Image (cartoon, grey):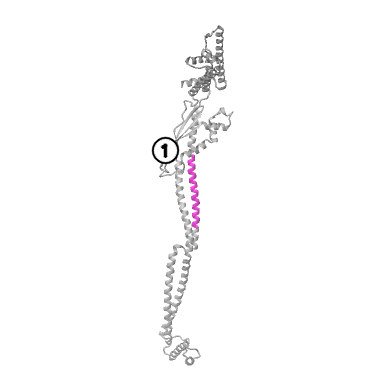
């Protein structure tokens, strides 16, 4: 029957009645908490703080070719440091997790080391040079390592920090060198293209040397000049021909021999015959008459030894006119030759002018291609020089770099387990277990205790109550029960100590750790 608790006296009675139900679970859990707190091996933590410093030289003078935010590079470096080969090298170097090598696989050991390494970033609002606005940026980060040996923990933390510093320098140098090599390769390729286009332009100019666009104005001017010269020579030729006709007419009227009348008459007849033939035919009577007269006169002159055919003229006026006529004819031939040469030259200039638009189109296309390549080459040359300067900046470690501002120190206190917290939880659980056990037993006990409980159970009033009579046998039974409980508790404690000593940790070590914890 459930007991009603009306006052403190009832509660005290329950505690007295169920004292062993409270004490035994509570002591058992408390001892278990103490054993757990002492059995868990302590772990120490060593932390390194690394500052991300900006480049020393202002960005207005030297721009780094390493782009991206520091946090992105940190995650990339973190993935490389946390790779299996890197961690396995550290494990073998310091002989870490030696107790796990016989029971765990290599992957499990490396996974455990990754859990023991803590990587945290420190952010702050800084002015982004790209946007000019304050944005959260990573300015530092911390590296921590947890382990059982303080000295080993410190050494591993320092090694991890040095790996981050070396990897950052290597990655930045590799990126800048790769950028400069890429720019150099691109610049070499464009330089080869420039040489090829220059050769094409030279060949094109060689094949169209006289029809190039820059000679267009010259060709037009020369064409006009030659045309003017031809016009002038044409006028000059016409004048010379008129002079030739005049001299011919004059020469026909002057006898070649001044002393011979027959010669004069013969010349007159010949001129007259020429005039007649220019107007009438051979059958005309005057023509026949003149021919007969010329024939008789020539016959008479031959008979007299005065043959005028082929005789050398001795008339000075005739000789002068003849020489002037020969000079005029020579001038006509010279002018004709000059006109022919000029017309040939004018035809050449005309062909040049006609070919200029076609040549200009091809020449402009080549020039545009050459100019575009030149602009690209100049841009690549500028970027290549900037990449070389940026590579020198990283090589001299003047760019953005990682600096250790708080190196890993030898840990003096373990970070786990938290003994006070474990003991406090053990006390709370012990009290809860004791009270819970007593409450459960009390709730399941249907015994009638006291007159009030009997009256409620039967529905009749209790007239009298006989007090408990304790005999010597009862006292002996209670004493034996107490001794039995005490012996059981002692046996449990002894067995627990043996279990801890042989399965968990030597009791001397437990005692030493307990004393050290208490001192701390």
Q: Residues within 10 Å of mark 1 (few under 14, many from 20)?
A: few
Q: Position of residue 329 (x, y in %)?
A: 44, 79
Q: Main secondary structure of the magenta part?
A: helix
Q: Does 179 appear in magenta?
A: yes
Query: How far across and down, in percent of the image, does residue 343 sit?
Result: 46, 72
Is residue 237 visible to us here?
yes
Compared to residue 133, the image places residue 520 above or below, namely above
* Quadrant assignment, res 219: bottom left
* In front of the other: 87 or 114: 114
- Seen in the picture, residue 18 relative to 240 is either above or below; the reply is above
Q: Residue at x 42, y 38 (%)?
A: 125
Q: Using the rendered view, name the quadrant where residue 326 is placed.
A: bottom left
- In percent of width and height, residue 109 lies at 56, 31
Query: Total label count?
Result: 1
Q: Is residue 276 above or below residue 472?
A: below
State the extent of the magenta-drawn residues as a range: 170-199
Locate the N terminus by quadrant.
top right
Say which residue appears at 46% left-offset and 54% top-offset.
Answer: 374
Disc 1 secondary structure class: strand
Quick check: can you spot residue 508? no
Is 62 contained in the magenta span? no
Q: Residue furthest front?
A: 460
Q: Nearer the viewer, residue 54 or 258?
A: 54
Q: Residue furthest top?
A: 472
Read off the residue under disc 1: 125
Q: Position of residue 21 (x, y in %)?
A: 54, 17
């Amino acid at each position: 029957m459930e007991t009603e608790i009306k006052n403190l006296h009832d509660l005290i009675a329950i505690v007295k009645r169920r004292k062993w139900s409270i004490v035994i679970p509570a002591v058992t859990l408390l001892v278990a908490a103490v054993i757990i707190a002492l059995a868990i091996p302590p772990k120490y933590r060593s932390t390194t703080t690394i500052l991300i410093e900006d480049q020393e030289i202002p960005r207005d003078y030297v721009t780094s070719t390493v782009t991206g935010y520091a946090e992105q590079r940190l995650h990339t470096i973190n993935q490389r440091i946390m790779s299996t080969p890197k961690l396995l090298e550290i494990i073998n170097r310091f002989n870490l997790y030696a107790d796990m090598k016989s029971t765990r696989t290599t992957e499990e050991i490396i996974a455990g080391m990754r859990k023991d390494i803590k990587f945290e970033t420190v952010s702050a609002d800084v002015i982004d040079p790209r946007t000019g606005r304050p944005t959260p940026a990573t300015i530092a980060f911390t590296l921590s390592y947890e382990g059982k040996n303080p000295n080993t923990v410190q050494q591993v933390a320092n090694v991890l920090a040095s790996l981050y510093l070396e990897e950052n320098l290597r990655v930045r140098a590799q990126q800048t060198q790769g950028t400069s090599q890429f720019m150099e390769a691109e610049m070499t390729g464009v330089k080869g293209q420039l040489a090829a286009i220059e050769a094409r332009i030279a060949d094109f100019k060689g094949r169209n040397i006289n029809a190039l666009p820059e000679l267009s104005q010259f060709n037009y001017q020369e064409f006009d000049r030659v045309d003017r010269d031809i016009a002038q020579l044409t006028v000059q030729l016409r004048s010379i021909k008129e002079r030739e006709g005049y001299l011919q007419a004059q020469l026909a009227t002057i006898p070649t021999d001044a002393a011979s009348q027959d010669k004069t008459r013969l010349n007159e007849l010949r001129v007259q015959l020429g005039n007649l033939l220019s107007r009438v035919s051979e059958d005309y009577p005057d023509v026949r008459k003149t021919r007969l007269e010329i024939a008789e006169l020539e016959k008479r002159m031959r008979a007299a030894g005065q043959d005028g055919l082929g005789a050398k003229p001795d008339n000075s006026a005739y000789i002068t006119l003849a020489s002037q006529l020969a000079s005029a004819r020579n001038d006509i031939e010279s002018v004709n030759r000059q006109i022919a040469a000029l017309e040939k030259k004018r035809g050449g200039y005309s062909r040049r002018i006609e070919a200029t638009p076609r040549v200009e189109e091809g020449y402009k296309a080549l020039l545009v291609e050459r100019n575009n390549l030149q602009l690209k080459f100049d841009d690549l040359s500028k970027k290549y020089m900037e990449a070389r300067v940026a590579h020198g900046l990283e090589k001299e470690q003047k760019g953005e770099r990682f600096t250790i501002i708080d190196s890993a120190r030898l840990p003096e206190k373990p970070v786990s387990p938290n003994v006070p917290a474990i003991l406090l939880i053990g006390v709370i659980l012990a009290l809860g277990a004791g009270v819970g056990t007593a409450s459960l037993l009390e709730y399941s006990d249907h015994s009638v205790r006291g007159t009030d409980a009997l009256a409620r159970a039967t529905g009749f009033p209790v007239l009298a109550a006989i007090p408990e009579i304790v005999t010597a046998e009862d006292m002996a039974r209670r004493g034996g029960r107490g001794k039995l409980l005490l012996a059981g508790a002692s046996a449990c404690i002894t067995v627990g100590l043996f279990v801890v000593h042989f399965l968990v940790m030597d009791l001397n070590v437990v005692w030493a750790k307990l004393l050290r914890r208490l001192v701390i």
